[in-house]
Image (cartoon, helix red, strand yellow):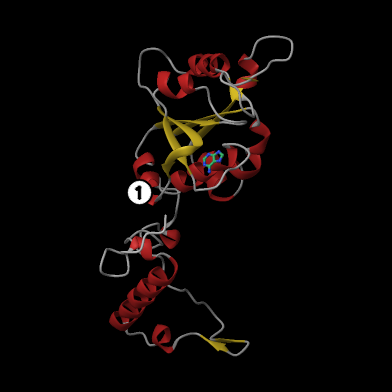
Amino acid sequence: MRIDILTIFPEMFPGILDVGMLRIAQEKGLVDFRLHDFRDFAKGLHRNVDDRPFGGGPGMVLKPEPIYECLESFIPRDGPQPTMIALTPQGERYNQNMAQELAQQDWLVLLAGRYEGFDQRIIDGLRLREISIGDYVLTGGELPALVLVDSIVRLRPGVLGDADSATEESFSFGLLDHPHYTRPVEFRGMQVPEVLRSGDHARIARWRREQAEATTRRNRPDLLPPGEGGERRDD
Ligand code: ADE
């Protein structure tokens, strides 16, 4: 899988992309990251990538020219086209299903915005899919781009070993994950639940399911179907 990232702060990325699973995925040739500083395509003495908004108002808006020219520098006119995503607070809210869908693609382009946002002709003319990572505003799309990268790359075949399998984790069955324990059996007066040491696999599976449902009901009732605690949607 290839992932191109457009940003004016490429220095924000290596610390995340070059450690842990993402580093291993690169070393195994499972993912190829390419960073593009779109300021390189800005014209003029000051290489401005932003300008004041038409109609007035606070903040600056990212200009279309540097972003279009940056994309045209590496996307051939004919041939396979990437799935292109802009990270903005106005986008669809990101979730595990979207991560799974994007992990099926061979080529993604992520655009990290800054300032008040993108000139709308960047979104419309390039048919960008807008994605938000949550209902809060960050100073730019770089962290959201990294959130997408991390959640997508770990789902690619060969990235996680069996021990870290992505099939039994939060959101995989529409529920949050169950609690986990390791040794020691007793730590500062707190015990590992007896059922997990019983060796009775059916009982363990039932206990984990009940715990997952209880945690989901408590922390995320919106994930449950209506009638099972999911009728209350605060968002
Ligand atoms: N840029 C600024 N805030 C953002 C958010 N919540 N999600 C995606 N991109 C953003």
Q: Is residue 135 above or below residue 111?
A: below
Q: Quadrant of the N terminus?
A: top left
- Which residue corresponds to mark 1? 97
The residue lying furthest to the left in this view is: 227
Q: Quadrant of ligand 1?
A: top right
Residue 152 in the image: x percent, y percent?
A: 44, 44
The residue lying furthest to the right in this view is: 45
**Looking at the rendering, which quadrant does residue 82 occupy?**
top left
Q: Is residue 112 left or right of residue 9?
A: left
Q: Residue at x 32, y 76 (%)?
A: 205
| Closer to the camera in the image, 161 or 9 | 9
| Closer to the camera in the image, 120 or 157 | 120
Q: Is residue 192 above or below residue 115?
A: below
Residue 18 in the image: x percent, y percent?
A: 61, 42
Residue 106 in the image: x percent, y percent?
A: 38, 33
Give the residue type at disc 1.
Asn
- On whether ligand 1 comes within 8 Å of the CB at mark 1, the answer is no
How many circles with numbers are drawn on the protein?
1
Q: Is residue 211 above or below residue 19?
A: below
Q: Residue at x 41, y 62 (%)?
A: 170
**Looking at the rendering, which quadrant does residue 34 occupy?**
top right
Q: Residue at x 60, y 22 (%)?
A: 56
Q: Quadrant of the C terminus?
A: bottom left
Secondary element under disc 1, as helix, strand or loop, is helix
Q: Residue at x 55, y 47 (%)?
A: 136
| Any part of residue 30 in sight | no
The residue lying furthest to the top in this view is: 44
| Closer to the camera in the image, 117 or 165 | 117
| Any part of residue 164 in sight | yes
Disc 1 packing (10 Å; few <14; some 14–19; many ≥20): few
Residue 138 in the image: x percent, y percent?
A: 60, 42
